[in-house]
Image (cartoon, coloured by chain):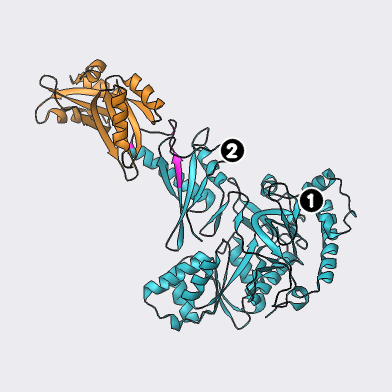
């Protein structure tokens, strides 16, 4: 399971810049990111090069951080590539809570991060039908 | 006009003699009937018969809201439940409300003191009084109601809310007196102005407003926009309800019905009794209540007492408009709110209560309460859905426990200031 950093941010001017600047100062390199927002706040999700270090350093700076286990999959980089994997999950009754992709690719594969409501079941189904699962290091060193 | 000249214009020496008799009788009564008070009185070495002057009251212990909480719900009642014909409740400092009780005779006294206030507000049998205080556990609605029936006014028991209907019936029924919170009175006139209705068709002449603090500036606003005379009525459930005091046409303070409710001013920190003319915390002793008598109850309201003769002819002592409190209670849309109530709700969500802050604003005429809650790792969920769900759950619990709907705002850690010593948990942006 890939360790994703989740940060809580108030929807206030400068909060996002503040976080990114902090990470820059701590030498944390972002591999993938996504923001889920509502009127008053947002959850910033990041795949970084060293999640444990990032968590510790961001906590020290007063940010509200948590580590969430997510699954990374590698799918064919062509139309329909992602749908195949999602269809499998749907048939197995596994829900996707959220997902986002890495920009850029690895060979001819596109990399997608998924958070599932039942990670164990999801992983089992994906593996059974031959969907490539990302190694942790592949995510951190992308 | 004066409802009860004998009581309200009594020569001071006669009044004080009456008060001394009543104090002596009260202390004996609670000593024998309320275990809580017997213990407290014995602890200060009091025995029945020890009170020989009014000043001796300063030797007696205080009663606080915490005492009422500790004896929730009925342990401080001085009569058996079979004698209690009414129960009311108001906000407590935790999840439980503050409970008060009344015998039949208590209700008569309540109606009597409220009747005096209504007469101060020029409301008599010719009056048509629209009571827009809440009816229910809150003492406002029913308190004014019985006093109004006693003076013979025509009572319209509207309770709170439903502004359009309030205005429609006010016009159709020809209400001459309005009884509600001052902020609701402003809200009503604002709605009236927005509706384009013709104010000259309304027969409203007087208002009797209370249950929340309001400034002279606000009084003038209400009077100008409504074209009425607005009177300030004071009370608290623990002492009786509305009717403890009210101001007269001289507008030089609120006359306290001190034949029933004995006022003192104390230093909020030391508890020392302060003389007339000095500002401090208002304390009441209820001489005549049967079901729920209180000795030296600390109201936490800050004011000054004056006993120079009043041009209206009443000899009862006057209190200035309340200027603040010695605790952190606030009043939002007429409802008492204690920050500790919020804390007790937040404790339901984890082992420790997160840092929080109450922000009170007045948008237009109505109060708005926002509760900022600092998210902690324990409460943080990774999805917006779950966080919104958390906000909604807190909202519902706050509504249920406080009786008021508040905007819940999740904020980042360390965004709420920390304080050394007593935390300042309330930011009140209202200019009353």
Residue drawn at the location 49% of the way across and 50% of the way down: B399
Q: Horizontal and vertical percent for residue B255? A: 69, 69
Q: Secondary structure at mark 2?
A: loop
Q: Horizontal and vertical percent for residue B60? A: 80, 51
Q: Which residue is mark 2?
A: B421
Chain under callout 1: B
Chain under callout 2: B
Does residue A91 show up? no
- Judge whether residue A40 is colored magenta: no
Nearer-the-camera pick, B355 or B152: B355
Q: Is residue B48 above or below residue B309?
A: above
Q: Is residue A50 above or below residue B8?
A: above
Does residue B27 show up? yes
Q: Is residue B349 above or below residue B245?
A: above
- Mark 2 Cα within 10 Å, few/some/many (few <14, many 20+)? few
Nearer-the-camera pick, B37 or B204: B204
Nearer-the-camera pick, B27 or B370: B370
Q: Is residue A80 left or right of residue B137?
A: left
**Is there one chain holding both mark 2 and mark 1?**
yes
Residue drawn at the location 50% of the way across and 64% of the way down: B183
Q: Horizontal and vertical percent for residue B99? A: 65, 53
**What colour denotes chain A?**
orange
For the stretch drawn in magenta, the main secondary structure is loop
The span shown in magenta is B371-383
Q: Is residue B104 above or below residue B229?
A: above
Which of labels 2 and 1 is toward the front? 2
Q: Which residue is mark 1?
A: B34
Kindly report the distance in space between the C-alpha atoms of the residues bearing marks 2 and 1.
36 Å
Q: Earlier in the sequence, mark 2 or mark 1?
A: 1
**What colour denotes chain B?**
cyan
């Amino acid at each position: 399971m890939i360790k994703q950093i989740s940060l809580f941010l108030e929807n206030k001017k400068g909060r996002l810049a503040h976080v990114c600047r902090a990470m820059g100062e701590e030498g944390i390199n972002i591999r993938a990111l996504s923001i889920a927002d509502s009127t008053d706040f947002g959850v910033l999700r990041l795949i970084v090069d060293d999640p444990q270090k990032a968590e510790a350093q961001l906590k020290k700076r007063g940010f509200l951080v948590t580590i969430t286990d997510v699954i990374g999959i590698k799918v064919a980089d062509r139309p329909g590539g992602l749908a195949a994997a999602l269809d499998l999950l749907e048939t197995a009754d596994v829900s996707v809570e959220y997902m986002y992709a890495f920009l850029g690719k690895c060979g001819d594969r596109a990399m997608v991060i998924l958070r599932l409501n039942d990670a164990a079941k999801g992983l089992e189904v994906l593996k059974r039908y031959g969907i490539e699962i990302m190694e942790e290091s592949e995510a951190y060193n992308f | 006009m004066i409802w009860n000249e004998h009581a309200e214009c009594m020569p001071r020496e006669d009044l004080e003699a009456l008060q001394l008799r009543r104090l002596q009788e009260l202390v004996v009564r609670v000593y024998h009937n309320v275990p809580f008070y017997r213990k407290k009185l014995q602890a200060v070495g009091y025995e029945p018969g020890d009170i020989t002057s009014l000043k001796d009251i300063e030797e007696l212990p205080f009663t606080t809201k915490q005492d009422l909480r500790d004896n929730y719900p009925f342990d401080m009642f001085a009569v058996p439940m079979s004698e209690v014909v009414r129960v009311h409740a108001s906000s407590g400092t935790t999840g439980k409300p503050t409970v008060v009780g009344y015998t039949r005779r208590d209700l008569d006294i309540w109606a009597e003191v409220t009747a005096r206030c209504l007469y101060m507000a020029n409301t008599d049998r010719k009056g048509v009084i629209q009571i827009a205080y809440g009816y229910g556990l809150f003492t406002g609605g029913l308190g004014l109601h019985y006093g109004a029936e006693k003076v013979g006014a025509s009572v319209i028991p509207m309770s709170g809310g439903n502004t359009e209907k309030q205005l429609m019936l006010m016009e159709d029924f020809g209400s001459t007196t309005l009884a509600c919170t001052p902020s609701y009175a402003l809200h009503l006139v604002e709605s009236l102005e927005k509706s384009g209705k013709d104010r000259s068709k309304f027969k409203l002449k007087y208002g009797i407003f209370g249950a929340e603090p309001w400034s002279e500036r606000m009084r003038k606003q209400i009077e100008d926009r409504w074209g009425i005379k607005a009177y300030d009525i004071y009370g608290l459930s623990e002492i009786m309800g509305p009717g403890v005091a009210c101001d007269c046409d001289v507008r030089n303070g609120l006359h306290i019905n001190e034949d029933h409710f004995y006022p003192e001013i104390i230093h909020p920190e030391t508890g020392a009794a302060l003389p007339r003319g000095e500002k401090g915390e208002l304390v009441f002793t209820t001489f005549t209540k049967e079901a729920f008598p209180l000795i030296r109850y600390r109201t936490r309201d800050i004011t000054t007492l004056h006993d120079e003769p009043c041009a209206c002819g009443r000899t009862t002592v006057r209190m200035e408009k309340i200027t603040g409190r010695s605790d952190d209670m606030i009043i939002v849309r007429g409802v008492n709110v204690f920050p500790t109530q919020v804390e007790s709700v937040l404790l339901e969500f984890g082992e420790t209560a997160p840092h929080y802050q109450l922000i009170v604003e007045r948008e237009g005429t109505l109060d708005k309460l926002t509760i900022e809650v600092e998210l902690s790792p324990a409460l943080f969920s990774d999805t917006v859905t779950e966080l919104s769900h958390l906000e909604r759950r807190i909202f519902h619990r706050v509504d249920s426990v406080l009786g008021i709907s508040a905007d819940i705002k999740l904020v980042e850690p360390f965004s709420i200031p920390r304080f050394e010593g007593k935390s300042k948990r309330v930011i009140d942006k209202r200019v009353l």
